Amino acid sequence: MRRLRRIKILATLGPASSDLAMIRRLFEAGADLFRINMSHTPHDKMRELVATIRNVESSYGRPIGILVDLQGPKLRLGAFTEGAVQLQNGQTFTLDSDKTPGDATRVNLPHPEILAALRPGHSLLLDDGKVRLIAEETSKEHAVTRVVVGGRMSDRKGVSLPDTDLPVSAMTPKDRADLEAALVTGVDWIALSFVQRADDVLEAKKMIRGRAAVMAKIEKPQAIDRLADILEASDALMVARGDLGVELPLERVPSLQKQMTRMARRAGKPVVVATQMLESMIQSPVPTRAEVSDVATAVYEGADAIMLSAESAAGKFPVEAVATMNRIGEEVERDPIYRSVLTAQRPPPETTAGDAIADAARQIAETLDLPALICWTSSGSTAVRVARERPKPPIVAITPNISAGRRLAVVWGVHCVVADDARDQDDMVSRAGQIAFRDGFVRAGQRVIIVAGVPLGIPGTTNMVRIASVGPEGDADI
């Protein structure tokens, strides 16, 4: 099954999309990989979903990626005697270590690390930012705050701290258990929530030991300040606009989205734009015009993937949401302006053999107007470097490793095929033409460009470009 767009679609699974028939429909509608949110998914259900996705994958013979999204630390208030209180603007409200149920003047904050890290002047956002407090007096036992934006506050609402650098890991004991269960099941990507620093990513990678790739979710101001280091430590980024928009002024989110998208492309690492992309389709079969424009903006910016959350997990129209996203991607990519935007944003190649080869292959393919750029790749890195160039022709990645193929499901423009490794260079050229011919990328008599590493089968040795003609049976020769 060949997609007619380059941007990838990441669909979240949930109550509305957990059986075989629905996952199959989502894949047919355009989903390239699936997200399992461990905030709502027990281990048994996670394993069932993975098995179902692998079933769909075997039916279509095309690698499908699976991303497990770890919950991360959830900071919450304690309980109130009456279940809820009304906080008034200007009043004093205390957060403390006393486990006694709270009232309109105080409540327990069962996170000593917050009380230890808070400083006067720091903001506290409660219930997704609906209520805002400013710390005026702090100690390890309590924090006296002033209510800046009041409202109703009930038991165990979430707490966000945009100004406070918390000395806590991005992984809780629950996350560690979820991570190990996911790795044993054989998922492809791990999304790490509430990353504050590169060490959070390195801690996860130490546990993962190469069994999956790590996607850092950027949703805290502290992560923005250390973005370069986090990106270097990660395999991919997710622009998690929901929590980012709680802890930062909403008007900053669009510019940060663009900055992160371009920064990830310069680094040659995938970037996913997420949250509320087609939010109204949770209840409606059609999106708003503003949502269509939002999705289109991510496509124009050259993001690798766009994500559906509740739209596909719990909404009434999961298939329609994926199909809508698919149509938006196709339409934007037909616009001549799209190609000019990608070209204008193209970063110079890094000073490596792989980047030099990828840049040269793109230039040759576009100069000769070739119908496909074919990569032989063991680890997937060759295809990722070529995708960084955002070439005009489609990228066909051929790999002997199914795990590499599944990870490439999130990478812009890559159509991945799992096949036996080439025996020699002649076999590599011939089968590259056959695969591209079979999957509809080229016709007999056309030429293709082939990128590979010699010796074959050794990751990270991209050093060869070949131009070959496709014969009447699809086999290619020089």
Image: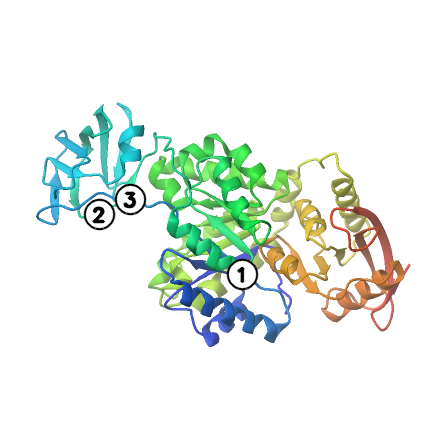
Q: Position of residue 280 (x, y in %)?
A: 35, 58
- For marks 1 and 2, give the CA distance: 33 Å
* Mark 1 secondary-structure assignment: strand
- For marks 1 and 3, give the CA distance: 28 Å
- For marks 2 and 3, give the CA distance: 12 Å
Q: Which residue is mark 1?
A: 33
* Mark 2 secondary-structure assignment: loop
Label 1, residues with CA under 10 Å away: few <14, some 14-19, many ≥20: many
> Image point 53% across, 68% down: which residue?
27
Given residues 318 and 140, the one toward you in this image is 140
Answer with the quarter of the image where residue 265 lies: top right
Amino acid residing under circle 3: Asp
Q: Which residue is mark 3?
A: 128
| Closer mark to the observer between disc 1 and disc 2 | 2
Amino acid residing under circle 1: Leu
Amino acid residing under circle 2: Arg
Q: Which mark is residue 442?
A: none
In this rendering, the answer to whether 95 lies above or below 392 is above
In this rendering, the answer to whether 114 lies above or below 243 is above
Left or right of 362: which side holds 403? left
Q: Which residue is mark 2?
A: 156
> Image point 78% across, 55% down: which residue?
457
